[in-house]
Image (spheres, rainbow, N blue to C red):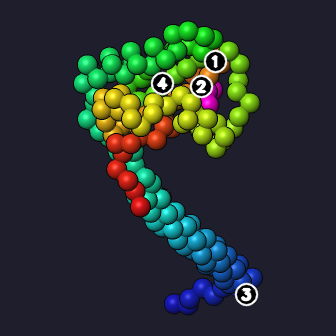
């Protein structure tokens, strides 16, 4: 019995095909390790980011009588003139007062916030803050669409002091 022998050309083809297979495996392995490592870092970043977000503090909803008094207070403030109270929205995250103005105010950022705090927000001595309690009060001044309005938050005297 004689064993068949491989010719050098056949042997070289077999060796080359094995080397190509091995080289493909080696090129995919570092790439996959990089992808897995990237996914691990991305997961850690997302978890860290998600847990570090300041969550809005949900509070107990205001009673119906308080909501009525608050809405009445602001409707009296904007009864006359060109500025009109559009609506007052209540949620467990705060109170938003939507006020329609005839044209956009020529103020932005801190200037607008200071103007709203000193001109439109109820004074700290007002009895309306008893009804608002610790809920945030936001004033939204808009011309045509509420979502395109300029918002500013009032300083709530009942809010816990953060240091």
x and y, in percent, of residue 78 in the image: 52, 15
Label 4: element kind: strand
Q: Which residue is mark 4?
A: 97
Q: Which residue is mark 1?
A: 101
> Is any part of residue 60 visible from this angle?
yes
Q: Is residue 94 magenta?
A: no
x and y, in percent, of residue 58 in the image: 32, 40
Q: Which quarter of the figure has residue 147?
A: top right
Q: Which numbered disc, 2 or 3, marks the residue that appears first in the sequence?
A: 3
Q: Magenta segment range?
A: 147-151
Q: Which residue is mark 3?
A: 8
What is the C-alpha distance between the residues marked 2 and 3?
Answer: 87 Å
Label 2: element kind: strand
Nearer the viewer's eye, disc 4 or disc 3? 4
Nearest the viewer among 46 and 54 is 54
Q: Which numbered disc, 4 or 2, marks the residue that appears first in the sequence?
A: 4
What is the C-alpha distance between the residues marked 1 and 2?
Answer: 6 Å
Label 1: element kind: loop
């Amino acid at each position: 019995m004689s064993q068949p022998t491989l010719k050098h050309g056949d042997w070289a083809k077999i060796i080359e095909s094995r080397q190509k297979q091995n080289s493909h495996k080696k090129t995919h392995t570092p790439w996959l390790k990089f992808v897995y490592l990237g996914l691990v870092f991305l997961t850690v970043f997302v978890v860290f980011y998600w847990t570090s977000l300041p969550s809005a503090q949900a509070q107990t909803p205001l009673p119906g009588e308080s909501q009525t008094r608050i809405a009445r207070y602001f409707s009296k403030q904007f009864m006359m003139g060109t500025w009109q109270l559009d609506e007052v929205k209540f949620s467990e995250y705060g109170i938003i007062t939507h006020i329609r103005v005839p044209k956009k105010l020529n103020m932005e950022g801190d200037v607008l916030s200071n103007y709203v705090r000193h001109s439109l927000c109820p004074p700290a001595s007002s009895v309306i803050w008893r009804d608002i309690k610790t809920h945030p009060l936001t004033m939204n001044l808009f011309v045509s669409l509420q979502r395109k309005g300029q918002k500013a938050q009032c300083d709530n005297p009942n809010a816990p002091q953060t240091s």
